[in-house]
Image (spheres, helix red, strand yellow):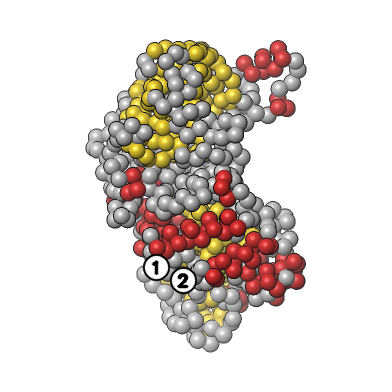
Amino acid sequence: MAQQSFQLSAKDAGKRFDGIGVVNGGGATAVLLKDYPQQQRREILDLVYKPMFGGSMSAILVEIPGDGNSTQGSMISHSHHRGDFNFERGYMWWVMKEVKKRNPQLSIDATAWSAPAWVKSYWSADMVDYYLAWLRGLREVHGVELDALGCHNEKGKNYAFAKMLKKSLLANGFQNVKLHGFDNWGKNKMDFLQDMKRDVELQEAFDAVSAHTFSEIPLTPEQRQLVESMNKPIWNSEDHIYLKGFDALINIVKCFNENYIVSGATRIINWYDIAGVYPMEPYSCDPATVLAREPWSGHYSVREALWGYAHYGQFTRLGWQYVDGGCAHLQQGGSMVTLKDSATGDYSVIIETKEAKKPQTIEIKVKDGLKTDALCVWYSDEQQQFVRLPDIKPRRGRFSLELRSQAVYSLSTTRGQQKGSFQQIPASKPFPIPYEDNFDRYTQPYEWGYLPHFTADIFGCFELTERPDHQGQCLRQTVGEQPLSWAPKWHHYTILGDSAWNDYEVSADVYLNPQDEAAVMGRVCDVGSGYGVWAKGYYLKLNDQGRCSLVITRGKLNPKELIGDAEQQAAILARTDVEVGGEYVLDSAQVTGVSACQWHQLKLRFEGDVITGFVDGREVVRTTSARYPRGMAGLLAPLQKRRVATPYFDNLKITPLGRTPISILPHPLSIQPLYPFVK
């Protein structure tokens, strides 16, 4: 059997290890996690972030929320308009405090995908101010210090902005925040390097050079050499492993290994951590480590991907050092990376053999100050993940190991690793129906981040606020202008419920400001691809002049599919087997007695193919449509010519009819506030 030999030395001076980890954000990825009962919330976060337990992440990159869609959904900004600052909005503050609570040494990185309309440009002084305000809120209100900041996520490059941002960080007490950029993807993502080499001020602005998806497009040897000549670390601020089962696990390890071996990356962040999103949403399963889709039941499930992170996270620490003599591709397929603790002489070797066709043997000689103690061995393959094998005891500083193909190994002189788990995970239950919420239980909205349970904002922000008549709490879509969104724009809307629902009623009271419109949604079965938010389903819309419309929305319109004259195009639109986008009014009516600054009830009923709309209990529109037979409920604030509607919603109610079975939870929910001690 072929044998490959390696020599590991404490004197081998590789790069500093800046951590492996995950993104929380780049979409509203944890929107349902926040609504779990306290025990399950704690367990899920422990599995991903607690050292020596599960994934044991050493780094996290969070999204700085900006009101715009950034893949699955949108997250509520700390500053909707100029001069507006509220550092209790949203759940991202809570996420950062929770991960730091589990691992104080964990490195927190951040960047923005979107920004409010008042910012005007991603590359402006306004954007610098936006970042600085967020950093102050993080420090002064929540007691968390940020470790690193990116210029912006996947929106090109701007040298003047990078210099301005760095100067502002230094001038405002954030000199310890490392600036990196430009966090783009594609073949041109590193095109700024030659300019950076010539521009000393730009070099000084960046503490690290960063980009995305090195597993798809690695750095060329020339690019790597150029960055290293400037003495800058290389960070991969977003890689992607969209796979299932053990294939996800082994490819995560392969990604981490090859990021260093090929591209010299010392921090590798994968998108994303915990799938606290509805199954219907894009990327709702494959990238994540834990599926947390059912806060109403408390059920969650662990994916094999988690143990790919554990093969690194439980065997390394932030600030360790790569041992270049133990970082290489294996001759028979696979890769190996070695890291050491320079202070103690401990070291770990992480190996994957995804590309190997047959077993192979490696021999390792340890010398010059690395420990010669026994090594623990942890192993994963298709049949078993993260199991401990017998220790290896070096003889005279040498040992050998036979490696199976399609396997992952972690060897280490450290101890304390475990395959963490919890007993009695609650059973899966469907979303409760009948369901209703008058929002009055959120007596202190800031405790909940101004967000109600179970709604998932796809675009814009539906946040808790006082009713205009001061008669309790309600929801309001608070973003009146289109933000600088990472994803293309559409109406602002939020969803909740079960995509299997077919026959039901959804109703809500709506309060229309002058020139406002508001809608309730039903049978929502698609919310876009991840870069686009056009829904598929139906909505019932009312404006402040009493015009009521029953609308079908069929996703993004592709004009190329609409061929022929008007009659032929109408025939195409009527077909149920063709995916043609756009919005079409199925029925409309003028309702008397409706004006601005009044409460009115909208109700949308689905019974088989018959769809009926009601205003204040009176039927006003009706149609027959078989296009979408099932889907979730939602609330919608329409995008208008120059603004977005900002209506209020209250007394949300969903009632099963016909084929939709009743689903009642046996126990009342016990959800703890995110910020019980902020005020």
Residue 186 vs 201, above or below: the answer is: above
Residue 603 percent location from the top left of the image: 40, 20
Q: Most extreme residue toward the left, as rendered?
A: 667
Quadrant in the picture for the N terminus: bottom right
Answer with left or right where residue 33 lies relative to residue 424: right
Residue 373 percent location from the top left of the image: 43, 80
Residue at screen point 73% across, 70% down: 199
Residue 662 vs 451, above or below: the answer is: above
Q: Is residue 15 visible?
A: yes
Q: Which residue is mark 2?
A: 317
The dot on residue 104 is 1
Quadrant in the picture for the C terminus: bottom left
SS assignment at label 2: loop
Residue 590 vs 667, above or below: the answer is: above
Residue at screen point 62% across, 68% down: 206
Amino acid on which disc 2 is placed: Arg
Residue situated in front as seen by the camera: 75 or 363: 75
